[in-house]
Amino acid sequence: MSKLELRAVVQRYGRQTIVSGVDFRLEQGSIACLLGPSGCGKTTLLRCIAGFEEVSGGEIRIHDEVMSRPGYRVPPEKRQVGMVFQDYALFPHLTVEQNVGFGLGSLPSAAKAQRVGELLETVGLGGQGPRFPHELSGGQQQRVALARALAPKPELVLLDEPFSNLDVDLRERLSAEVREILKSEGMTAVLVTHDQHEAFAMADEIGVMYEGRIQQWDSPYNLYHRPANRFVADFVGKGVLVRGAVLDAHHVRIELGVLSSGVPMECSQGCASCGKGCGVEVLLRPDDVIHDDTSPTRAEVIHKAFRGADILYTLRLASGAEVLSLVPSHHNHAIGERIGVRLEADHVIAFRDPG
């Protein structure tokens, strides 16, 4: 039995369709992420799951019970859903322990105090109960918000851009910590973010959204290595598309060499093995292009981004095409320098050439 199931969910504001026919299922204990750019519909979809908005079409089920369909909506407080907001939404006049225990009003005092104490320990805030939100850092306030959402042991936890107000280092650390907390509590959760690093750090499965639709629902690994379309390939990770020619169903030639594919490729004519050298566009990731001083193939450094242990080089090939290469930072080359490169890709991501 699925913990959460969406069936062809549609949401419209007037004549404008914001969410268009979204389907997915989430099992007990899984953490999912809706990932996409601003305006893609991910937050609207989360609000529909929470019950803050009605749906224009389709159906939302939680624990196999219908929560939303056109003309019917179970109110948020009846859904057993915990919500963690972008701005924390803590009560400033209540202490940390009072915030966490806010949704436990029906419990006896002793049981309530025990649950609050356990959660504060779980989120790393043991002993902080008497303090007020304004006395805490942003990361600590977000932990309080998470503890408050978990306190009633909800069926589902929803997190709406929960780390966007934090600095990059704290965001990365806290996203990994929150995943561990959710897993330790056995919670099922849905995260909304535009940051793929947060998505990869937290989620078991990710739905990449664009223009109101799920473009691909998959594991982080498959989204990076096997994107379903150009949008996913461009949005997830870094890479560039280069022109190639299909040699047969499993081989394509690009400027840097011949790539082998375990999966048959479609050429620009829509066939898999015509052998006519039809055009495709091949996605190259920075780790597919290796710096090699002994290689006869040379590329010009036109941009470099220092990243500590690595440098991300933008390189111009002889044809004028540009590729990216991630190189250990002790190979520090100057703009305009020509360096040796070779191709080392163990998979092929190719799309039909629109030209």
Image: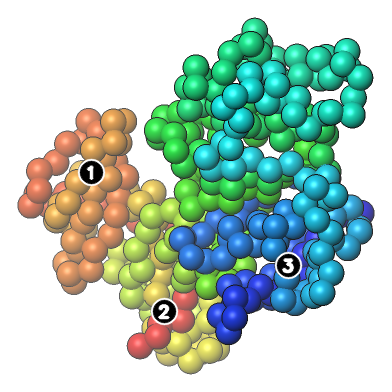
Distance of mark 1 from mark 3, alpha carbons? 46 Å
Up-down: is 203 above or below 328?
below
Q: Residue at x 74, y 63 (%)?
A: 24
- Could you tell whether 241 is left or right of 144 in the image? left
Up-down: is 170 above or below 327?
above
Mark 1 surroundings: few (<14), some (14-19) or many (≥20) residues within 10 A: few
- Could you tell whether 40 is left or right of 288 in the image? right
Quarter of the C terminus within the rendering: bottom left
Instruction: Depth check: give the residue in front, 75 or 305.
Output: 75
Q: Which mark is residue 280?
A: 2
Where residue 247 sits: x, y (%)?
44, 79
Name the amino acid type tagged 1. Answer: Ala
Secondary structure beneath label 2? strand
Q: Nearer the viewer, mark 3 or mark 2?
A: 3
Instruction: Depth check: give the residue in front, 47 or 222.
Output: 47
Task: Provide the residue designation for mark 1.
Answer: 305
- Could you tell whether 71 is left or right of 194 in the image? right
Where residue 204 sits: x, y (%)?
67, 46
Q: Nearer the viewer, mark 1 or mark 3?
A: 3
Where residue 285 sits: x, y (%)?
39, 56
Quarter of the N terminus within the rendering: bottom right
Mark 2 surroundings: few (<14), some (14-19) or many (≥20) residues within 10 A: many
Task: Provide the residue designation for mark 3.
Answer: 54
Name the amino acid type tagged 3. Answer: Glu
Where residue 290 sits: x, y (%)?
32, 48
